[in-house]
């Protein structure tokens, strides 16, 4: 706690002081460009990995970056999605999973959570579609391979869940909303983006117009295929 309190002073005297005009502007209202949905994991800092300024990201965080399907839970996730799109006019959503995700590890052994963590057990039931898909289609994988493919598929499950929300469905129909699936890799700092055409996770700059050669250098291992995913521990090798 002492470290946090020292940090409050450092923030006020350095960052806040240096960006005071921005903070004054933000008191008049917020205009974030992106709804960023990610995990509560302490190792993920959305503004840090995207280098976004204060006020640019509207963020939902929870265990497993889960968005329950519309009507299944009267919780904050759905209300926040509605507010972001209807009230703030956000036109881009990012669902960002991450490697070594503890929530997805729990999903893969869901029944073991029932007694010790009943609330987590009930929460993960909202992504039962991911668990079922993995069980019935990736039975040949195990260990880190199985975890990484589950993380990748879970991002896609949440995108499908988002589409069950009337406001999302309507804006997609109008062409006024885009949804992106990302995976952040803890061991490399790399972010991969889902490409629906190839059904692979690829370099994110391939999904925006214009060239960004100097911003995101492409590594040797540049794709995650949902057909066969290499464990995160071997990210620096070929995929």
Image (cartoon, grey):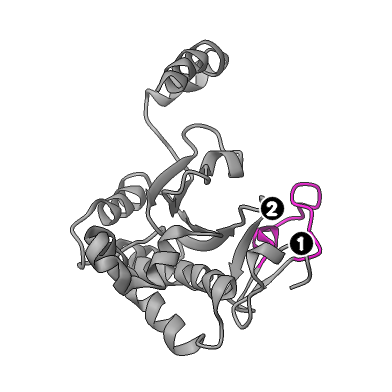
Q: Is residue 111 above or below residue 188?
A: below
Residue 140 horizontal/vertical position (percent): 55, 88
Q: Main secondary structure of the magenta part?
A: loop
Where residue 211 appears, x then y in whole percent?
77, 55
- 230 vs 22, left or right, is right
Q: Quadrant of the C terminus?
A: bottom right
SS category of the residue bearing label 1: loop
Q: Which residue is mark 1?
A: 236
| Residue 234, image x, y percentages | 71, 66
Work out whether 9 lies above or below 200: above
Residue shown at 41%/75% (left/top)? 130
The reply to whether dot 2 and dot 1 touch (C-beta < 8 Å) is: yes
Residue at 67% from the left image edge and 63% from the top image edge: 233
Q: Position of residue 121 (x, y in %)?
A: 27, 65
Q: Nearer the viewer, residue 45 or 208?
A: 45
Residue range in magenta is 202-221
Asked if the stretch drawn in magenta spans residue 215, the answer is yes
What's the CA distance linking mark 2 and mark 1? 8 Å
Res 133 → quadrant: bottom left
Q: Residues within 10 Å of mark 2 (few under 14, many from 20)?
A: few
Quadrant of the image occupied by residue 145: bottom right
Which of 60/147 is in front?
Answer: 147
Q: Identify the residue under disc 2.
A: 188
Label 2 residue SS: loop
Q: Which sits earlier in the primary sequence, circle 2 or circle 1?
A: 2
Which residue is found at the position 53% from the left and 45% from the top? 43
The reply to whether residue 164 is visible in this rendering is no
Name which residue lies at 33% across and 54% down.
Answer: 81
Q: Callout 1 environment at 10 Å: few (<14), some (14 to 19), or many (20+)?
A: few
């Amino acid at each position: 706690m002492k470290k946090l309190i020292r940090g409050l002073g450092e923030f006020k005297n350095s960052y806040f002081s240096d960006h005071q005009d921005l903070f004054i502007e933000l008191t008049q209202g917020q205009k974030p460009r992106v709804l960023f949905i990610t995990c509560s994991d302490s190792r993920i800092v959305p503004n840090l990995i995207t280098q976004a300024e204060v006020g640019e990201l509207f963020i939902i965080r929870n265990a497993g970056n889960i968005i329950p399907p519309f009507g299944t839970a009267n919780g904050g996730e759905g209300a926040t999605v509605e507010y972001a799109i209807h009230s703030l006019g956000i036109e881009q959503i990012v669902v960002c999973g991450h490697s070594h995700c503890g929530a997805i590890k729990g999903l893969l052994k869901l029944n073991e959570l029932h007694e010790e963590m009943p609330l987590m057990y009930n929460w993960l039931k909202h992504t039962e579609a991911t668990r079922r898909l993995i069980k019935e289609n990736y039975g040949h994988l195990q260990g880190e391979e199985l975890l990484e493919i589950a993380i990748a598929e879970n991002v896609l499950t949440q995108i499908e869940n988002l589409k069950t929300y009337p406001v999302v469905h309507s804006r997609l129909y109008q062409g006024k909303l885009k949804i992106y699936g990302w995976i952040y890799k803890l061991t490399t700092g790399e972010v991969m983006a889902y490409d629906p055409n190839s059904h692979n996770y690829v370099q994110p700059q391939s999904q925006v117009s214009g060239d960004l050669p100097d911003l995101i250098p492409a590594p040797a291992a540049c794709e995650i295929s949902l057909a066969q995913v290499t464990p995160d521990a071997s990210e620096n090798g070929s995929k």
